[in-house]
Amino acid sequence: MPNFFSVALLALALFTATFAVNIQTPLYGAYAAESDVGITAMTIAFAAYVAGLMPTLLFLGGLSNRIGHRLPIVIALLFGTTATALLTLKPSLGSLVVARVLLGIGTALATTAGTSYMNEMMGADNARRATMIVTSATSLGFGGGALATSLSLELQGPTLVPASFIALLAIAPLLALIVFKLPHIDAPQCVSLLRFPVFPTGTWIFGIAMALAWSTTGMTISIVPLELKSQGLDSWTGFVVFLAIFIGFLCQPIARRMTNTRSLALGFVLIPLGFLVLLAGIWTGSIGLVLAGTCITSAASYGFTYLAALNEVSLKAPGNHARAAAGLFVYAYVGFSLPVIVSGSLADMFGLFSAIAIFSMIQISITVITIMLWIRPYPSSKAGLKEVKR
């Protein structure tokens, strides 16, 4: 199979696997009404995604080194199909929890194996381009699912079986079969199935940045839509979720031309700035400000920070792309899930806006502290400088 088509099909498979992750987001309100639960329960259901994802990243991040890269991607596509079928047949909070766990496992398998597979398929000389293709495909997938469901609901009217679900159920199994036809360029290694993530030396700052960026995305696609619904703006939910990721995709070509350090620094500035604009939009009831803030945070989360971080860990772990990607996503998904769960509990106690405002203050504080630690010179360097002056 020609290399161009192989790369395109792999990108499409990664897009589809991640498309399934947020496809049900615009229906959260409907699921909550069906099960008669509060905000905390919904945020826990949302974060169940991480209950499937984290163990897979922690213990099976290098699985593709043992069984090859194609099978984990096939499993991810089938898990996405199963999760969507479950919500189609039995829409409820319980089904949502199970579906999110399956989607978490699938995402962990697809992103780690897909990153390694794309790098090997395109070669070491195209490492940055391979990383951009992976981040672009997954960014579009994460955002596209929610937008597709919102558009389906606009066209069909209220329903628990939108056309986006039917499309995924038709396409994902077919893609799973096609993935087996992709080139078998990786040689499975005789290693343990249980392989822990790799955290390359000197990449901690990129991991913290991913945690901050994706905590903002988690809030934007889980808590913010609930506040929009309370203000009668829930028809914008899918578009908000889509922008929360799509604008980052548009920024990736710009980020690609920057050094990883410069891209990271820009992300640090945009993350709290964007969320403050979003918070102002919620406070004033301005959907324009909400969308503007979402775009700014998206540029950081899935543009500058995501591409810089994934590229950095890939460069510093050339023989361990899958496990290094797993290590990075451990940072990312801790940030993605814990603030959402805590904010859900705070929302039930103090209200949604208060919970969002508290998150914003904590986010700014952690960002400032992290930047100070990053730019602070080491004491030994300062001491050495004094010795030279003497």
Image: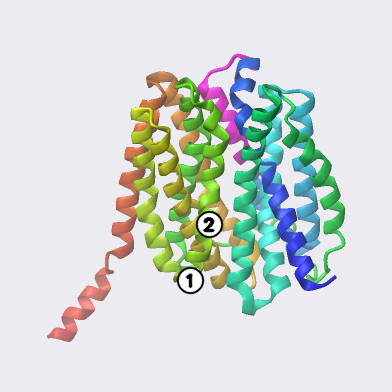
**In x, y percent, where is residue 374?**
33, 62
In the rendered image, which residue does mark 1 sit on?
257
**In x, y percent, where is residue 232?**
48, 21
Q: Residue at x 76, y 70 (%)?
A: 4
Q: Is residue 92 above or below residue 133?
A: above
Q: Name the image colouring.
A: rainbow
- Answer whether residue 216 is visible to the viewer in this image: yes
Q: Is tag 1's residue or tag 2's residue first in the polypeptide sequence?
A: 2
Q: Quadrant of residue 262?
A: bottom left
Q: Nearer the viewer, mark 1 or mark 2?
A: 2
Q: Is residue 184 above or below residue 291?
A: below
- Answer whether residue 211 is visible to the viewer in this image: no
Q: Quadrant of the N terminus?
A: bottom right
In the rendered image, which residue does mark 2 sit on?
250
**In x, y percent, where is residue 35?**
64, 16
In the rendered image, residue 215 lying in the magenta stretch gets the answer no
**In x, y percent, where is residue 354?**
35, 26
Q: Is residue 285 left or right of residue 319?
A: left
Q: Residue at x 46, y 26 (%)?
A: 227
Amino acid type, callout 1: Arg
Q: Residue at x 68, y 65 (%)?
A: 116
* The residue stretch that appears in magenta: 35-50
Q: Is residue 159 above or below residue 36?
A: below
In-front residue for pair 313/195: 313
Q: Residue furthest left?
A: 390
Q: Secondary structure at mark 1?
A: loop
Q: Is residue 332 left or right of residue 165?
A: left
> For mark 1, does the 10 Å Cα neighbourhood hold few (<14), some (14 to 19), or many (20 or more) residues?
few
